[in-house]
Amino acid sequence: TALKHSDIQTAQRLSGIIKHRGYTSQTISSLDKQLSGLQRLEDAWDSAQKMQASGMLTEACNALSAFTSNALYRERAEILIRQIKQKQLNAELQTATTMYSSGMFKEAEELANDIIKMDPSNQDSKELLSMIHVRTARNPGPKHIRKSSIEHDDGDNAYRRCELDKAMKLWSETHSESNTRKLVIAGTINKYLNLGKTAHAQQRYNLAAAYLEKAKRFDSLLNIHDSSCRSAINLFLAGAYSMLGKEALAKQSYQQANGYFEKSSGCDPSNSEAAAGFLALNEKANELYKRAYVLSGANKPEACRLYKQAAIIAQGGSDVYKKIKEHIITCKPR
């Protein structure tokens, strides 16, 4: 009955009692498999929520979409997905507004139109479009004649190699609207990438991450696939986030450290600093788990607090996380 209603905590408790009394049967084995499947589902749900909390919105949205076909999680998943998409739309609108303020009217118009396609009722984007149309009607841009696409292709290829100066030079030689747009965006990427590198070298990692996130955002607007520039931005971003994680770890801000290491790993899964950070967090979680285990008989409220704290900082899927989850169920009201 507990499994039928997806009550994992009760099912685990009763399964433990049955095994303790030495009962075995094919039915119990089948129930164990169902319970294991539900537990994996709950772990995946926790992982998706951690992604959202860490700012990995696209990854969280993709992970949550798998839950929309599950009756137990569907309503919660759909609510979270709507919230994430709204955050993404707000970020898009902020970028479009910044472009408008910087005189990038064509780019702002394209982005505002994209937002309206995703959210036809978005009044802020409609107002921004009206402002753009009024501004461009007063100050129409020059009409350029399209040349051969040879320079266009060379510019794209140079950008793929992260040769920004060469790419911008080649794009500037062909006066097409497409190349003018790329030229402006590439210049913006170059600016933020250099600012991010400088801030990173000065060990101002928060500032470095902010600049590099902007470079990454503008890079996505170019829509040039297999870009070395995107890889370069991600590598620097991963470095900045891993250093922020180390700083948070040193201050014993474990939950914040976990969030930074998640972001670092999301930018560069092979980042060694993030991997070392996760190991350190798992060790701390294991330490909290042992303290909670010792206290579980004498001081259950304190033990529960430590179990929950350990679960927050442990990496999802790790052995210590699985052990902690087994004990947390005893803290929940029955």
Image (cartoon, grey):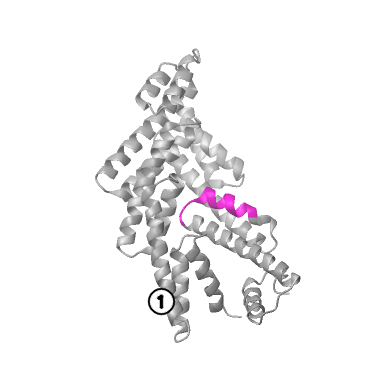
Residue at point 70%, 69% (across, down): 29
Q: Is residue 126 depicted above or below 24 in this figure?
A: above
Name the dominant secondary structure of the magenta segment. Answer: helix
In this view of the protein, can residue 310 be seen by the observer?
yes
Q: Is residue 133 depicted above or below 243 in this figure?
A: above
Quadrant the C terminus occupies = bottom right
Residue at numbered disc 1: 291
In this view of the protein, can residue 139 be seen by the observer?
no
* Residue 253 position within the rendered picture, expressed as x and y whole percent measured from the top left: 35, 64
Which element carries disc 1, helix, strand or loop?
helix
Quadrant the N terminus occupies = bottom right
* Residue 243 position within the rendered picture, expressed as x and y whole percent measured from the top left: 32, 51
In the image, 330: left or right of 218?
right
Magenta stretch holds residue 60: yes
Please state which amino acid type lies under the numbered disc 1: Arg
The image quarter in which residue 167 lies: top left
